[in-house]
Image (cartoon, rainbow, N blue to C red):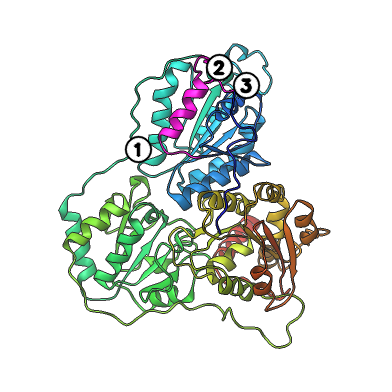
Amino acid sequence: MQHDRIPAVSSVPGRHSRRNRDLPRRAADLLVDQLIAVGVDTVFGLPGAAVAPIYDALMDRPQVRMVTVKHEANAVFAAAGYAQTTGRLGVALVTSGPGALNAMNGLACAFSDGLPVLLLAGEAARDGFGRGAVQEGSVYALNLVGMAAKVSKLAFEVPEAAALPSMLRRAVGVAMTGKRGPVFVSLPLNVLGVAIPAPAVVFSATSESGLSQAPIEQALRALSGAGRKVLLAGAGTRFGHGPALLREVAERLQCPVMTTPKAKGVFPESHPLSLGVFGMGGHPSTTAYLEAGVETILVVGSSLNEVATDGWSPLLKGGRTLIHVDVDAARVGRVYETDLAIVAPAEIFFAQLLQLAPQAAAMSPCRILYDRDPQEVPDGVGPGIGAPRALWELQQVLPPDTIYTTDSGTNLFFAIHYLKIDHPDAFVCLMGLGSMGTAIGTAIGAQVGNPERSVVAVLGDGGLAMTAGELLTAAAYELPIVVAVLNNGGLGMVEYGQAAVYGRTPRFETAPMSVTDLARAVGCDGTTIDGPNQVAAVLKARRVRPMVLDVHLDPRATIPGNRRVDKVKKSARVAELN
């Protein structure tokens, strides 16, 4: 759905422009110009005194859209959603002190998920460092750069205006190359206001390298030998030509493919070689295939963490040949004993493998199996609608390239399991850290970056309570996102886990909260869905504005099985015994 309702800022530059008044160029002006030079067209942020010069500079650059969110963490979530669905650098701009602190959760999520985000954080003027300046975050106070260094690829403070061009160039390069990830840049107020000439700076954010032929040949021999094989694709295959090359490799070798939950969609789930998702919330078809015996497993672009492996399942290793390819050497062989370790970007590995791979004979098509049929509507169901049915109805109406963003909680497991995704950029879940309250922010970023496509945020009522203010952001910019709130009246994932481990649980209610009334109060359309066959009618009549669906779930709904509850049970019992 096309929209063009996102202005750069609320004011249009005219005779008050610094350019028109022939005023000297500040570091803030240079910063904005250099962001434009590397293709940045959107900045997500929340203003404050420490970043006032940058906001002023943006008023002279109408080609940059400024999207003002309601909480700094959501500025980073939006930048992350933009980055994942466009493949470009996402930029967030926040003020000093509490602004930067609020953004840390988003920064940690982008770091855990390997998303290229540039977080520009204001800072008090340097002459106030150590003297109790308002909202100071310097090394003498909170040491925000030190905090950010733990959850980013690179974190630094720009000490003087002359250093800004080269340091910004380095920040962009680090974010966009190798294993992608966020960079934190602290910008003291006095640095931003200094007048400086524009230096000749050439930005380069590409990195290409070749592999020696021996490990490629060894991998190909294992994949071409006798016995069954499977390819596990992680989120590291998502960017660039990775998804297209992944599909070509699978078809050339006739190798079935399963993805990690975070990589859902990098291989089309309607493809005859797709087994679906392996890991938490995954499909029985993947575990059944592994249980039947596999000679060679090729893992590409995954750290093989707890989520990706369904609690470090032994099915991924047990007398088989395991080949692990990842851009980060520290992740290869860390979890499972690896027979062949290759440190390389996914697309380079795939490209070189294809140069040698012969065409294999066609195999029987695979089929994704589900815990239950999502179309099923049991007779005599109680109030509400099953989550599988609700998600199925969404996909019957919306275009095939719709982007779905998800939150942490039971909604995530339903989305991983029951949504069918065929596009590599159409499923966004910040699972590395597992923060609640991410879905609406990432949906805003995805919609801004992809104005021609439909975007759906899938979340629970608990996640909505954390981030409801961003409904106002979506309404203010007339973003036509669909917000599907899978409403079970409480913190369902926590209650489920408590009951499974201890046999009882407190009731963590979200009531009293009328999701429909809340949506309407902030300028969105809001509708209650309390049974099957209602979603289609509502979506067909929606307007170019946010639509919030308050989906009342059948109280008997259960999430797709996973091994995490078993791990929690085991850990909790050990703790009790100790």
Q: Which residues are magenta?
A: 16-41
Location of the C terminus (image quadrant): bottom right
Q: Position of residue 241 (x, y in %)?
A: 33, 55
Q: First in sequence: mark 1 or mark 2?
A: 2
The residue to which callout 3 is attached is 141
> Residue 318 at x, y = what percent?
35, 68
Name the foreground residue: 365 vs 195: 195
Residue visible at 76% across and 80% down in the picture: 382
Closer to the observer: label 3 or label 2?
2
Query: Which image quadrant is residue 324 in?
Result: bottom left
Q: CA distance from mark 1 to mark 2?
A: 35 Å
Q: Three-letter amino acid code at disc 3?
A: Ala
Q: Secondary structure at mark 1?
A: loop
Mark 3 burial class by Cα count in 10 Å: few <14, some 14-19, many 20+: some
Evaluate whether residue 508 shows in this view: no
Q: Is residue 38 magenta?
A: yes
Q: Which badge, 3 or 1, is on the more N-terminal residue?
A: 3
Residue at image point 45% right, 47% down: 114
Which residue is identified by label 1? Answer: 205
Residue 249 seen in the figure = yes
- Tell me, yes or no, whether the two marked residues, 1 and 2, touch with CB atoms within 8 Å: no
